[in-house]
């Protein structure tokens, strides 16, 4: 796999081309501002410049898609992309349905208990979250357990975590800007037990 920071990667080539074009553009701007005689670009030059930008974008998109496909093929060959069996809740200590909406989360447990702002779990439990959005694209992030997921409206997304061993309240937040109340779209993962 290519290193994103490697000097021989296509990203480095693209960055060099971008800086060359940027430098030429800034140079042309200074020439236009400070030369005693005014000059104007020919129309074909303007079209050529815009065409060059389209070539850069097309090349970058093509190479990015090529790298993603190679990465996915490598992961599939290693078995990393195989979907885990999430059908049976027996693999998990708890299954919680999450309904995301502007601008909050609702948690529905297997016992049909609903909470507007907290998912209550036990230390070390494996939790399956079945996440659903009923309006816009939202994100589901629990920084303490290193999970981030994005999900589209009308489609269920399953993610699972192992609850922290230390009892306490852990932040759950939306990471996708979902409207004016996005900053308040927070809830808590409550790990029960006496805090030390």
Image (cartoon, rainbow, N blue to C red):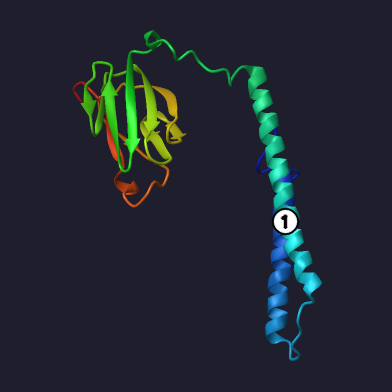
Q: Residue at x 68, y 38 (%)?
A: 65
**Closest to the observer, 156 or 169:** 156
Using residue 29 as the reference point, say whether residue 98 is left or right of it: left
Where is residue 49? Give x, y as percent: 75, 65
Q: Residue at x 58, y 21 (%)?
A: 81
- Check the picture and name the quadrant holding the C terminus: top left
- Check the picture and name the quadrant holding the N terminus: top right
Where is residue 179? Give x, y as percent: 37, 50
Query: In the image, is residue 121 above or below residue 91?
Result: below
Q: Residues within 10 Å of mark 1 (few under 14, many from 20)?
A: few
**Closest to the observer, 125 or 157:** 157
| Pointer 1 residue | 54
**Circle count:** 1
- The quarter of the displayed image where residue 140 is located: top left
Residue situated furthest left in the rendering: 194
**Closest to the observer, 123 or 41:** 41
Q: Residue at x 70, y 61 (%)?
A: 19
- The quarter of the displayed image where residue 28 is located: bottom right
Q: Residue at x 81, y 71 (%)?
A: 44
**Closest to the observer, 33 or 166:** 33
Where is residue 132? Give x, y as percent: 38, 30
Where is residue 80? Give x, y as percent: 59, 20
Q: In what element is the residue under mark 1?
A: helix
- The quarter of the displayed image where residue 20 is located: bottom right
Residue situated furthest bottom in the rendering: 36
**Residue 136 visible from this viewpoint:** yes
Residue situated furthest top in the rendering: 90
**Residue 196 visible from this viewpoint:** no
Using residue 194 as the reference point, say whether residue 138 is left or right of it: right
């Amino acid at each position: 796999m290519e290193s994103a920071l490697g000097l021989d990667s296509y990203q480095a080539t693209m960055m060099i081309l971008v800086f060359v074009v940027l430098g030429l553009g800034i140079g042309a701007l200074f020439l236009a501002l400070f030369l005693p005689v005014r000059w104007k670009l020919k129309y074909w030059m303007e079209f050529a410049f815009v065409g060059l930008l389209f070539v850069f974008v097309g090349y970058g998109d093509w190479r990015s898609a090529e790298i993603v496909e190679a990465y996915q093929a490598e992961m599939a060959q290693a078995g990393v992309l195989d979907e885990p069996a999430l059908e049976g809740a027996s693999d998990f200590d708890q299954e919680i349905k999450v309904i995301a909406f502007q601008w909050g989360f609702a948690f529905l447990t297997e016992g049909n208990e609903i909470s507007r702002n907290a998912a209550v779990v036990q230390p070390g439990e494996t939790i399956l979250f079945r996440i659903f959005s009923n309006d816009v694209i939202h994100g589901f992030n629990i920084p303490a357990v290193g999970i981030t997921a994005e999900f589209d409206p009308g489609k269920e997304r399953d993610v699972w975590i192992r609850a922290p061993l230390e009892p306490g309240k852990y932040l759950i937040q939306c990471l996708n800007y979902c409207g004016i109340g996005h900053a308040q779209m927070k809830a808590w993962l409550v790990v029960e037990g006496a805090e030390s």
